[in-house]
Structures are given as structure tokens and as C-alpha cells.
Image: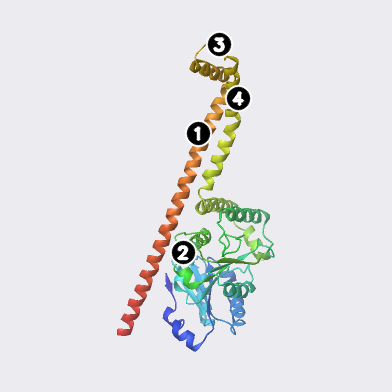
Amino acid sequence: MNDNRSSHCQCDSSESRAVVDPRPIVSVVVPAYNESAILEKNVDILCRYMQGLENQYRWELLIVNDGSTDDTAAVADACTKTHENVYVLHHPYNFRLGQALRSAFSRCQGDYVVVLDLDLSYSPDHIALMLAKIREARAKIVIASPYMKGGKVSNVPWLRKILSKWANRYLCMTVTRDKFSDKITTVTGMVRTYDRKFISRLNLKAMDVDINAEIIYKAMILRARIVEVPAHLDWGTEKIEKSGQRNVRKSSLRIIRSIIQSLISGFMFRPFMFFVFPGLFFILSSLYPLIWTLLNSIRYYQSMAVNNSTLDFRLSDAIGMAFKESPHAFVVGGFALIVGIQLFNLGLMALQSKRYFEELFHISTNIYICNRESNQRDLSEKIMKM
């Protein structure tokens, strides 16, 4: 990975910024993979839009070329020569979205980080909307949501629209709502605004699009405030035509992979739900055959009470007669009860493990922050001594 400009030249230190210019700095991040056809035009659009916000914000635009095999690298480098606020990070290989965002978060200089799709399926107007919201709500993350009230989806193929909508509904059911945050309706969306200090301290591991769900999950563990703004997702004619030209097999594999990642992300949010609810279902299912067995055993026992046999003999004989009448009730009821109890116990263990993980994540995050700040202080002291 390399940056065609020195990061020390992008902006001044935080103290000097506060004295010289009180406007916050906004870092706009646009990951790019084989986007040479639209890169120059859309970067121009974004730069013109950000210039219109210069009365409120200073800004930089960071293009992350994630190992493109077309002319994206050359076009991106050309953009840095025509726009002084544009910078480029080059990945030698296609590391995918997760690594692209982590690289950008580590290099951004802004007070706020805005992540946007380069194809502008979310128009640049969302930038000002999210920035106003994150400052007003004092949030750590603002999500552009097309699925909340006031949001809209246009020109998206029906299959992708349905899969995306239901994937987000499924994930939102697994999200634990914090009283300081909004009710989340979009977990998988990439278009967001972050508090730069917060996101740069978040230890992220995901390599692909599942990084979006990972950010939400770990932010919720740290009790970060997360809010949403209504958004308009519009693919437009160009993206629909481009999508239609893709290989059908690759597209199908991509959809399958997205479904699997959504299922895994949901498990990551609330793993105990995948055990407790099925366990309760099996336990409740076992009640009917077991109650039937109990009532019939009592009926046979009472009919045999006139005999002079011992209690144990009468009881075992009554149970035997009930079993003879309906053996499947014993088998099905007993099996369902055992499976239900085991799943319920696994759910409790998963809940306990999740709480252990949250505690460890809290501790490791604090250690990570302390070590990072300590290293930064040591580096500053060395620079001042030089």
C-alpha cells in the first residue's frame, strides 16, 4: 500500500487547526475497484459539492484504489493533480472492502469520515445531511438508511432489492437497541458518517462487506450512539446496465455469499437466539404427546386400582399399557424434550460467552487505545527532539 502524498502535509495538528480555523475537517472516503469509466466524472461532482460546503467544513477526498486491474490507478493519480484536496491510497491487490476501509480510517485526517459509493447511488446531498445529524445528535455513527421512514429505493433490480431489504430486517431483529441510539433499519449499508477518533480506535477484522455489520456490532458493545437519516438509494440506468452485463454465475455466487454473511452477522449479534427459540419450540412441541401420555397413564392406573397389586406394579403396568396404545407419543415427546433442553442450554452458554466477549472487547479496546496514544506521544517527543 502506498500514498502518493505525504500524510504530514495534508493538514496541521489539531491544536493549530483549532486556533487558525475552527471549521471541522471532513474526510470523504470512496473505495474504488475497476471504476476507471466513472472515476474522474464522479470525483469532479464530489469536489464541486464539497466546495459548496466550504463555509462550514474543510475537507479532503480519499480514493482507495483496491487493486484495480483497469486504469483506475492512473485516473485516480490524475485526479490528485487537478484537485488539491484529493488523495489516493493504492492497494497492490484486491483486498476487498474491509481492508479498503481500514486503510482509509488509518490515514484520514478529518474530524468526521464520510464513506460514500463512488457510483453515487447515494447522491452527494447525503453528505451534508449526515454531517448535520452527527453534530446535532453528538453521535459516533450516522447511517444513510433507505429503509427507514422517509427513505426510498429506486431503479434497483427486484431480486437485489428484496434480498437487501429482508437481510436488513433480519439483522435489525438481532440488533440490541440502545436507549441512546435510534432504532436501526439498515445494518449492511456502507454509506455512513463516522466520528474519526472513534472509528480509528475500533479494532476491526472483517475483510469484505461484512465489515459494515462488524462496525455496528462493536460500536454497540462500546455503547456508542448510532443514528440514521433517511436516504435515497438510486442505481440509475448506468448501474443497471453494468449489472446486467456481469457474468450471471458470478452474480449468483455474490448473492449467495451475501446471504451467508448476513446469517453469520446475525449470529454474531445475538447467538443465543439461534438456540433458545428453537429450544423453546421443541420443548413446547413435546408437551402435547407427553401430556397425552401422562393422562392415559393416569386413566389406566385408576382402572387398575381395584386390584390388589402393589403401587409400583400398577404404575409400571399403566405406563406400559399407555405405551402399547401409542408408542410414537413416547418417542416423539421424549426426543423433542431432550433436543429442546439441549438447545436451550446451548443458548444460555452462548449468552454467557457473548457477555464474556463483550467484557474482553471492552478491556482490549482500552488497552489498544492506551498503547496507541502512548506510541503517538513517544513519536511526538522524538520529532520535537530532532
Q: CA distance from mark 3 to mark 2?
A: 79 Å
Above or below, 292 against 86 in this view is above
Q: CA distance from mark 3 to mark 4?
A: 20 Å
Q: Is label 3 in a helix, a strand or a loop?
A: loop
Circle nearer the viewer, 1 or 4: 4
Circle nearer the viewer, 1 or 3: 3
User: Mark 3 highlights which residue?
Assistant: 307
Q: CA distance from mark 1 to mark 2?
A: 44 Å
Q: Is label 2 in a helix, a strand or a loop?
A: helix
User: Sequence order check: which comes first, mark 1 or mark 2?
Assistant: 2
Q: Is label 1 in a helix, a strand or a loop?
A: helix
The quadrant of the picture occupied by the C terminus is bottom left
Q: Amino acid at mark 3?
A: Asn
User: Sequence order check: which comes first, mark 1 or mark 4?
Assistant: 4
User: Sequence order check: which comes first, mark 3 or mark 2?
Assistant: 2
User: Mark 2 highlights which residue?
Assistant: 99
User: Mark 1 highlights which residue?
Assistant: 338
